[in-house]
Amino acid sequence: MPSIASDTGRHVTIDRRPGQYLSFPDVCLTDAGTLVCVYRQGDQHVATRFDLLNCTSHDLGRTWTKPRYLVPGVGHCPRMTRLPGGKLMIIDDQSQSTFVSMDDGAIFLRQSCAGSYIPIPDRVLPLRPDLYLTTGHTHQGESAPPKIRQAPSMQMVYASRNQGGAWQPYSVMVFDPNLVLCEASMTRLEDGRLLAILRENSFVHEPMYICTSDDEGVSWTPPRPTPLIGHRPCIGLTPSGRLLVTYRNVAPDGGTAAWMGSLEELDTDYAVHGLHPDTDNPRPTPQGLLVENEAGRESCLRYCLRPMTDPERARATLSAEVLVESAQQNACALYFCGWWRLTPEALLPPAPDAAPTALERGKPVRLTLRHSPGEVRAEVNGEHAGTYPVDSRRAEARPILVGNANTREHNGGRHFWRSLSLSVTEPRYERDYTWSWEHTQGHPDAWAQARVLEMANDREANFGDYGYSGWTALPDGRYFCAYHHAASAEPGYEPGRSCHIRGTWLEDSDFTPQPPREGP
């Protein structure tokens, strides 16, 4: 994907101090041109001590003041909005407060929020003086259905009639028993509709979803998938009228990412995302997309394809044509209700004690896997190769992956991927998804490679240690994004205990689609 991660002139450290886990920032530009950043200080990701801090910049982010306490001893995941008239409003869930500044962030006055508790609130969205909205999610019940492995999430919209002094439940944005939709971010479109983009938290590479409302948030459309895979999105309209989304990238290659485009581009279905740190692996050849690597993390390969949302009802077919010349046990595989491993001589099914299917060495193999609720049927070169029971009620039945079965060890080999195709029929959602790829087209994740901007890569970090972000437009036409970042490659990193606040400048030209890498 296009990346500015190594462009040191694009990045600045906002706050970094030993012994402090600094995270969950948001940023806003005041009418006077001051940038204000708010964030949490703690001892670890799941903190046992908390403070809310803020700092300011008077030169569009190049230098920052020392942090000041917004409120000590409490605070979690603040969001900040510039309201009509120039006021700044911060809302925070753990402190159950709003903080208002009338002087460009020099002083914030705290006001306890009466009414409803709002977990992980979004930025306050002022529709008119007597109607402010925000949104937050709650997990319903204590049981964890096996398809999502956690209590189902309900995303609620909350309204304030007195400009943030009290909040009450306003509407249900979305509730889906097969999707953990949460951490919504809302914006108002130019035509007056509201648009929300939501994190999906099943950890099966579901994308983010969007909903829209044409009645000021009273009712919402059913959720629709986007091409982006991420957590804690922050969405808004740019001065040019395009949408900008910053988010934690939870596709196979983790980091902090951004996307810019139109609603029509966002309102499309799934896009394949990949992990391939070595720019020369894989590489196009006339025989196929060649994966050739030693074992280890530096040259690993994995693509995530569209998962099944409701495998209890879904039907799916995954096909691949591959020529395997050499492969360690984790080198060449497809995940489809379990890892199907390919060697030069055999297909190894995921079922315990299942007999391998012999393959002819030196010849491409055409593998087709068909899921119907409760089973997977395998075909090799058009011939039936076994039917295997699966538990379609469990989350493990949902992901669909190709590449290395393990991206760290025993994954060296040499194999040519010639084609892939996937179809998923979801009766519950009245959705028929199809995708196909031939090696002459370049890389399977060409869309993401061209359109998702990597601000900071942190693939070696604990996923919670990066990527919550907020952004604001600058008067010089750029954008400034604040996010938490682990710097996992640096000495002293401890998963879940090391994090700092970083800022990055973005430009419209960063989001000009990049030409796909050429095939043979």
Image (tube, rainbow, N blue to C red):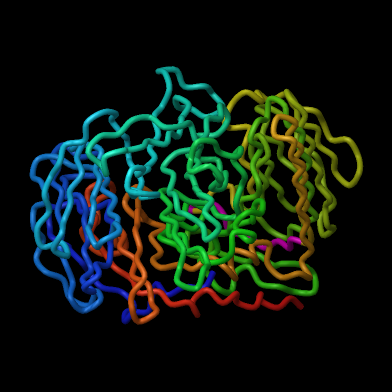
Residue 101 in the image: state x and y as whole percent.
16, 56
Q: Is residue 413 left or right of residue 110?
A: right
Q: Which residues are magenta?
A: 408-417
Q: Quadrant of the C terminus?
A: bottom right
325 is within the stretch colored magenta: no
Residue drawn 51% across the image and 68% down it: 241
Q: Is residue 226 left or right of residue 74?
A: right
| Camera-side residue of 285 and 265 | 265
Q: How many marks?
A: 0
Taking the image as drawn, is residue 418 in sight?
Answer: yes
410 is within the stretch colored magenta: yes
Residue 19 in the image: state x and y as whole percent.
12, 53
Residue drawn 60% across the image and 77% down it: 514
Residue 178 in the image: state x and y as whole percent.
58, 30
Q: Quadrant of the N terminus?
A: bottom right
Question: From the viewer's perspective, is residue 222 above or below residue 116?
Answer: below
Residue drawn 44% across the image and 17% down it: 143
| Camera-side residue of 119 and 124 | 124
